[in-house]
Image (spheres, rainbow, N blue to C red):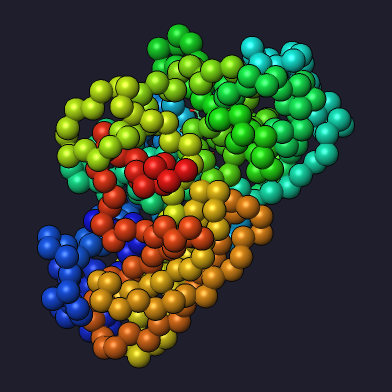
Amino acid sequence: MAMDRRVFLKGAIATSVATMLPINWVFAANRPEGFEPLDVSSLTWDQAQDLPSYFKVLNTNPLNAFPAEHMLDPVTTPADVAFIRWNGKLPDFANIDVDKWTFTVDGESAKQTKTYTIAELKKKFKTHTLQLTLECGGNSRSEFYPNTKGNQWSNSAVFCAEWTGVLVKDVLEDCGVKDDAVYTGHHGVDMHLSGKGPAISRGVPIEAALNDNALIAWAMNGEPIPYMHGYPLRIVYGGRPGSVSHKSTTGMSIRNKIHDGPKMGAPAYQVPNYPVAPGEKVDNKDFKIIEEMIVKSLITHPQTGTEFKSGKTINLRGHAWAGLRDVERVDVSYDYGATWHKAKLTRPVNQTAWQQWQIDLDLPQAGYYELWARATDEAGLTQPVVQPQWNLRGIYLMVATALR
Ligand SMILES: Nc1nc2c(c(=O)[nH]1)N[C@H]1C(S)=C(S)[C@@H](COP(=O)(O)O)O[C@H]1N2
Ligand SMILES: [Mo]
């Protein structure tokens, strides 16, 4: 169901949040079958660990948590609002010495192996500051029906911060990329929960590493990267599954084959290359790696559950992004898709930065509404009204990976 893009507005005549909605559920007759009004009382977050209460903690070991969607309203996501995803144990942050931290480039297809301190990276290469959209491959997974394995993210396992660092491309080219290079492999210090081996080591096709929206970054929003987001050095790729943006990174291999580190094998971060029925078994050889994220929009204002005075114009707004492409338009609907209204949309500040959309809505009468937003990218790909093709790992991606 397209719950990802809906926020509901409770009409002025509805009584309290706890009493069951809706007194006057406007357009209820149009709603898709099985569509129930949201239960507002289930939308309060648990307090856990030291995380602010606006985080919903999915698990603590490994640590996975996401913010309420309306916390993502700012154009640039503040670090203390961004979702947190670790696959294994946390790095030993207390013992990190930023002056001694190094980044090594190696691999079969590197002409030379080189090791750089952070100071050397800063000195040797041009510094770039870019806004990059980082989205977990499993963002919105909780909306699959039937549910799939994996963290049940809402739609807020995504953020767009401003990252400062050097281009991955400049560093790889300094070491020399052989003609037979196929893939990168990313390395770090955090261990698998068992204590044996790295928690994760993923990579991207070499062309992705050699474009202009991949950084080896030491700053997030102008500050040292917080522990949770990859202190002291992080690989960041805009528009690709978050798992390739390696936190607390110690290096990158230039591989002459598809990288084979932990979490590279099917079905992790992969989707079947043909449509499957829910629950259908798929042979591992019929999976393909997700390399780019798909077009999507997020409603960040008003907060889900907001009640307005009747007759008030409502400013509905949020962000939209589309992997490596630009978003071309965003439309919104308050009548379950019977009519769509075109929102104003900004241009991205740089490739893979999310874009901002907004629209003023005058709703026809007092009552309960569900608001939908639907983004369309420059290739004409649009968000489906229902959750796309079910797949084993709940990845919202089938269409885009088939296209490029
Ligand atoms: N070192 C390390 N980097 C990692 C991970 C991890 O477990 N360890 N998880 C990846 C995944 S799956 C995602 S979605 C993003 C999450 O980034 P965030 O925690 O800054 O939101 O980090 C990626 N980088
Ligand atoms: Mo992820």
Q: Is residue 41 above or below residue 248?
A: below
Q: Position of residue 156 (x, y in %)?
A: 42, 50
**Who is closer to the viewer here, 58 or 377?**
377
Q: Is residue 41 visible?
A: no
Residue 122 appears left or right of 229? right
Q: Position of residue 161 (x, y in %)?
A: 61, 49
Q: Residue lying furthest right in this view?
A: 123
Residue 18 appears left or right of 295? left
x 44%, y 26%: residue: 87
Q: Is residue 249 above or below residue 241?
A: above
Q: Quadrant of residue 165?
A: top right
Q: Quadrant of residue 262?
A: top left
x 25%, y 71%: residue: 336
Q: Is residue 127 above or below residue 349?
A: above
x 25%, y 40%: residue: 275
x 55%, y 49%: residue: 324
Residue 206 appears left or right of 314? right
Q: Quadrant of the N terminus?
A: bottom left
Q: Position of residue 290 (x, y in %)?
A: 43, 36
**Who is closer to the viewer here, 310 or 263?**
263
Residue 225 appears left or right of 309? right
Q: Is residue 349 visible?
A: yes
